[in-house]
Image: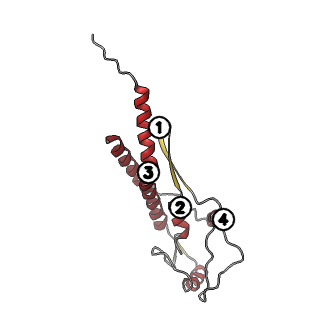
């Protein structure tokens, strides 16, 4: 019987882990993950009440709306500021045998106040992104719940990036 001894596997393991971590934390990958998640959130629409539609119609006159915005559907995209903040704040990490992405708003990040049609700011205080998220969640609209399709898309994206990094 012949044996072949392979040494320095700890170094190899460390090198592979480093490449995987680099792939998981890659800026383009985290941005793509964010865009995939935001697209999924925008597809998750609920109907807006008549009162909400009336308020939105009024606010549309003083505020630039996001291209995915619809007056009759709620999908967290009036101005798009809330979702753009999510894209900027995705962190990837590789621990154990899994990649983990944390998707959250900027800590203490404040949403800009809306304006009246005449350009006057509305409200006494500026709400944080987390306050807005909590308010919407209390109303039954938790936008940080993702579809299986979005999860699979993110997994495929990450897997491809890792394989590409390992191929180098």
Give me the C-alpha separation between circle 4 and circle 1: 34 Å
State the residue in front, 156 or 46. 156
Where is 26 relative to 70, above or below?
A: above
Number of residues whose C-alpha sits closer than 10 Å to that of mark 4, classed few (under 14), some (14–19) or many (20 or more): some
Residue that mark 3 sits on = 26
Residue that mark 2 sits on = 86
Number of residues whose C-alpha sits closer than 10 Å to that of mark 1, classed few (under 14), some (14–19) or many (20 or more): few
Q: Secondary structure at mark 3?
A: loop
Q: How many marks?
A: 4
Q: Residue 131 got which mark?
A: 4
Give me the C-alpha separation between circle 2 and circle 3: 16 Å
Position in image of residue 12 (x %, y %)? 40, 30
Kindly indicate whether the residue at mark 3 contacts the one at mark 4 (C-beta within 8 angstroms): no
Kindly indicate whether the residue at mark 1 contacts the one at mark 3 (C-beta within 8 angstroms): no
Q: Residue 97 got which mark?
A: 1
Q: Secondary structure at mark 2?
A: helix
């Amino acid at each position: 019987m012949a044996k072949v001894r392979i040494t320095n596997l700890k170094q190899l393991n460390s090198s592979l882990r480093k490449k995987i971590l680099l792939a998981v934390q890659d800026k383009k990958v985290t941005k793509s993950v964010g865009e995939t998640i935001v697209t999924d959130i925008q597809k998750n629409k609920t109907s807006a009440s008549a009162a909400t539609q009336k308020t939105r119609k009024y606010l549309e006159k003083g505020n630039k709306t996001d291209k995915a915005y619809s007056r009759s559907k709620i999908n967290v995209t009036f101005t798009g500021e809330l979702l753009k903040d999510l894209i900027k704040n995705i962190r990837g990490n590789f621990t154990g045998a899994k990649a983990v992405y944390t998707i959250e708003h900027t800590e203490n990040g404040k949403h800009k106040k809306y304006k009246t049609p005449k350009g006057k700011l509305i409200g006494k205080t500026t709400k944080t992104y987390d306050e807005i998220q909590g308010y919407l969640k209390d109303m039954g609209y938790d936008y940080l719940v993702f579809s299986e399709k979005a999860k699979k898309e993110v997994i495929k994206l990450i897997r491809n990036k890792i394989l590409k990094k390992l191929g180098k």
